Image (spheres, rainbow, N blue to C red):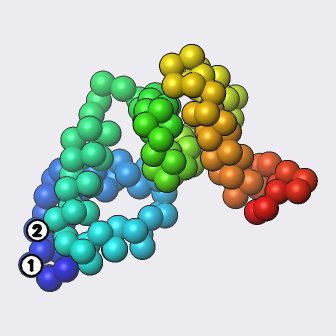
Amino acid sequence: MSDEQTSAAERSEMYRRGDEARTRVMGPGGAARRARMRAVHPDLERHLIENAWGQVNARPGLDVRTRELITVGILLALGREREAAGHIGGALNVGVTRDELVELLIHCTAYAGFPTMVTGVELLAQALEARGELAPAEGSSS
């Protein structure tokens, strides 16, 4: 990204709001992924941060915990495992509890089916293991 493009992105209020909202939820992770997006084209990363995070996630109508629960449920129902994994971690980062995520997974069975729940259980287990909050299962491949 050129200095001119970086300055334009930094000057955007929507980008600043989006970056702040994203960091609050996702933490500092994802820097390499964002850099890769910028390497393909700077507008891709800017579009994601300004729109998904700055316009949608930074809105005042729902608290961040509720937004993350909704986001995890939608991503699981759509089969977007990579994104769901990140947002499960994000949900935990903003105070969503393991029990609340378990309830979300059970709720998914009624609307998106048991395979969605099973996928979500695996992603939640991986997130909890990474945080040291769950011992790896015996015989697991991780």
Q: Are marks 2 and 1 in contact (CB under 8 Å)?
A: yes
Q: Amino acid at mark 2?
A: Ala
**Residue to which mark 2 is pinned:** 8
Q: Establish if 99 lies above or below 110.
A: below
Give the farthest residue toward the bottom: 2
Q: Establish if 17 lies above or below 102.
A: below
Quadrant where the C terminus is found in the figure? bottom right
Q: Establish if 11 lies above or below 78.
A: below
Q: Nearer the viewer, residue 59 or 114?
A: 114
Quadrant where the N terminus is found in the figure? bottom left
- Residue, x 13% and y 58% (percent of image)? 12
Q: CA distance from mark 2 to mark 1?
A: 6 Å
Give the farthest residue toward the top: 110
- Residue, x 44% and y 64% (percent of image)? 30
- Crowding near pointer 2: few (<14 within 10 Å), some, many (20+)? few
Q: Secondary structure at mark 2?
A: helix
Q: Nearer the viewer, residue 81 or 113?
A: 113
**Relative to 13, 105 lies left or right:** right
| Residue 4 marker | 1
What x and y, as percent, mark residue 108?
Answer: 56, 24
What x and y, as percent, mark residue 115?
Answer: 61, 33
Q: Nearer the viewer, residue 131 or 106?
A: 106
What x and y, as percent, mark residue 126?
Answer: 68, 52
* Residue 100 appears in the rendering: no
**Relative to 117, 90 lies left or right:** left
* Residue 21 appears in the rendering: yes
Give the farthest residue toward the right: 138
- Residue, x 88% and y 56% (percent of image)? 139
Q: Amino acid at mark 1?
A: Glu
- Crowding near pointer 1: few (<14 within 10 Å), some, many (20+)? few
| Residue 82 marker | none
